[in-house]
Image (spheres, grey):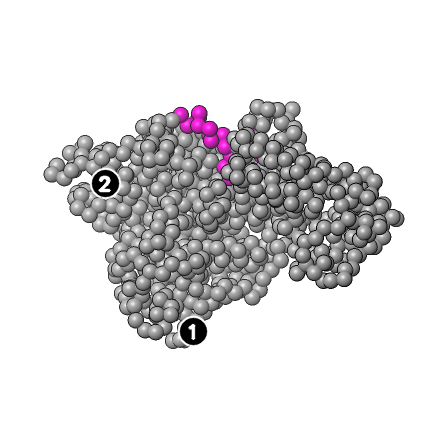
Amino acid sequence: MTSAAKKDPLAPLLVWDRLEIGAPQIQPRRIRSTYTVVRPEGTESVDLSYSWEEDVFDPSDPADVNLAAMILAQVALNYGLFCKEMVFKGPFDEKDRRFLGDMARNTAREIYVNKFLRPNPFLTGAAAEIPTVRLEDFLRARMVFPDGSPDSNSKSWGGGRGATCILSSGGKDSLLSYGLINEVGVETHPIFVNESGRHWFTALNAYRGMKETVPHTGRVWTDCDRVFNWMLRRLPFVREDFAKVRADIYPVRLWTVAVFLFGALPLLKKRGIDRLVIGDEYDTTTRVRFRGITHYDGLYDQSRYFDMALSRYFHRKGWRVHQFSALRHLSELLIEKVLVERYPDLQAMQVSCHAAHKDEDSGTVLPCGRCEKCRRIVGMLTALGADPARCGYTAAQIETCLKEVLVRGVKQESEGVDQMARLLHERGLWNPEEALPDPHPEVLQVRIDKEAAPLNTIPTDLRGPVLDICLQHADGAVTRNGRVWLPCDLHQEADFTLAAVHQTAVPDPGANPDLTGKRPWLLAELTWPEAAARFRETDLVLLPVGAIEQHGPHLPLDTDAYDADRLAREVAAACSDPKPLVLPLISYGVSYHHEDFAGTLSVRNETMAQIIYDVGMGAARCGATKLVIVNGHGGNGPALAFAAQMINRDARIFTCVESGETSDVDIDGMAETPNDVHAGEVETSTTLALRPELVRMDKARSAVPSFSSRYLDFTNQRGVDWNAYTQRISPSGVLGDPTKATAEKGRRMWDVMVRNLVEFVEDLKGLTLDEIHQRRY
């Protein structure tokens, strides 16, 4: 090992100085970006393109330019392990940069473990013998965004109709997804992504069939395959003859689904589609450890964590799109069974082979009959009593595949392989000399697993109808209890009515008109049965806490209480469904330091902490597992922090106190006044924006405090926390300059506070308690 390799064991992989992703070039039906690789051997470039069959972009619209930049950036996320720097040119806002950074880090780790630590026939040289190192971050590239853009590039879209895009191919998963969603009466849009390479052959039969008969069928073309292969030729550790290697894996890439998925987004935007369905089955959500490194076994972009991460990003951007799989509770074998028995015409279009070819006479795409995928499909179809010839296999191919299944096996969850073997045995097709595997009846049952396949992966309006169809072809339903599968009635499961995180609201034409205008996110306005139902839908609650205290001679005493309550309500209303529950306001706070001024009503720290503790424990008993205390008064801080600790200790739920931390940095940048602490520019501006009739600007006077030591300044980053009676600092009770306040400033401040807290709440909604403690992207 060289001295450089000893210092950096991953040095053999760092072969490029820079990867540049050029700014998007946009036409109404086409976008393009130039990818440039800078390496010691020289600088080379290649273009990446996408095109659509209809106008989807306005080149003069900043939001469209932003979307195009994000589409064209996805390919690059596969190469963060191999270059020192990745430069993304174009308009990327903070949400984009965060998403790209998170996904690049996750992908770098997955590629390192799955492509370099595990056997890979495409590798050569030192990279094929990379040692195991455990790092916090495997992303080697510094990510640079030279042309950052403001958040205003985001525009809200999503039709609110429940219209659903099926990310389509010729595989069984997307075909069944289409069949199920279409059968339950939803407006369904099969969108196919046409890769420039032979992979498009897998989708061609299905695309032709649906284009003729299914309204809303669409196609997106991209030459990403050509770009992927171009990149491989510039990675010295990849064999030069990689195109001739027969293998069922890609040489080094793992961020692939998003390359296609983002290409479909312009059609979702134009058509007002709310839902994006990806066909992923039960066993694709997995977290494992390999040589001490936790990872997703190369399946991250097929996991439910991927669905949640994408949905969370969409909602941050204002794109009201919910991504999910309708098949998360089904095994690969059960998916094939439902497809064969219920949708035989769709199953006849199935091509699950990346080495497929066109028949010269008919132009129909046919499977190769030799690869692992072919023997898996033939094995499952035969085990189910179906005829593989329906989707193009010849008698000779079927015979060969069945022999290979017995000898070489297939890449499938082990329980599925065992159950398929038992079914083949029942048909006299299993080697009688070989021991029969243990039975796994759950493989042909609808499985509920709180980690891999919870019930709330499917939106509530689709959940019952879709799963009921599947149950007609399954051997019942089971729920996981430790390592045991127990029979269950899906409709009676406690989580059956729990809303899916990020699901979009769909109007109910049969809704009771008497409920018009009702706000089901406000606990105080619900009956107890309604509250019970809401706690089954959401586990996140907001508790506003304020104070009744002096705010100078010009602001009302309830400023802190009103603002906390208003903020919690606006945040809940702005969140996606299921919206968090807002608990009734606790108006009184710890305000002893203002007691020299009439009207201030204070409670002791002990009283405040006990009230918060009791309310929090009550919310936990009702089903809340995440409690966000929205604090409108700084003096409450110590009591709230103590109460949060005790709730966490005794209820074991997530509890936090939000006293402006999500927005203070932004708000400070909008204010002119230093040491603006109380009843000054900020609070006067926000009150002018909401309740101008209660502001006495004629009484407003500046009273900006100054102190003998910078360490005593309340807003100094090096300042210490200290306590004082307000009157000793300001006879008027004002600590700031209310004369600089305006309603316009206040409106901008409120927008920031609501937007930032909504983003935080949306993040929490998509996380289990386990995921809060351990990042899962």
Going by the numbered disc 1, the residue's amino acid type is: Thr
Residue at x 71%, y 41% (from the top left corner): 590
- Could you say whether the residue bearing mark 1 is in a helix, strand or loop? strand
Classed neighbour count for the residue bearing mark 1: other residues with Cα under 10 Å, few (<14), some (14–19), many (≥20):
few
Quadrant housing residue 558: top right
Residue 531, horizontal then vertical, whole percent: 58, 28
Q: Say which residue label 1 marks.
A: 43
Q: Is residue 436 above or below residue 702?
A: above
Name the spot of residue 173 as percent of width and height, x first: 36, 41
Helix, strand or loop: magenta stretch:
loop
The residue under the point 25% across, 57% down is 246
- Whether residue 608 sits left or right of residue 379 in the image: it is right
Identify the magenta region: 489-508
Q: Is residue 342 left or right of residue 662?
A: left
Q: Is residue 264 left or right of residue 203?
A: right
Q: Is residue 293 above or below residue 562?
A: below
Q: Circle 2 sits on which residue?
A: 379
Q: Position of residue 357 (x, y in %)?
A: 28, 52
Q: Residue at x 78, y 54 (%)?
A: 736
Q: Position of residue 287 (x, y in %)?
A: 38, 47
Proximity of marks 2 and 1: CB atoms separated by less than 8 Å: no
Residue 400 shows in this picture = no
Callout 2, which amino acid?
Gly
Instruction: Give yes or no for residue 499 being in the magenta stretch.
Output: yes
Of the numbered discs in the image, which one, if any, rests on residue 138? none
Q: Quadrant of the N terminus?
A: bottom left
Crowding at mark 2 (Cα within 10 Å: few <14, some 14-19, many 20+): many
Residue 464 located left or right of residue 170: right
Reading the chain from its start, which is encountered first: label 2 or label 1? 1
Whether residue 416 is in magenta: the answer is no
Q: CA distance from mark 2 to mark 1?
A: 48 Å
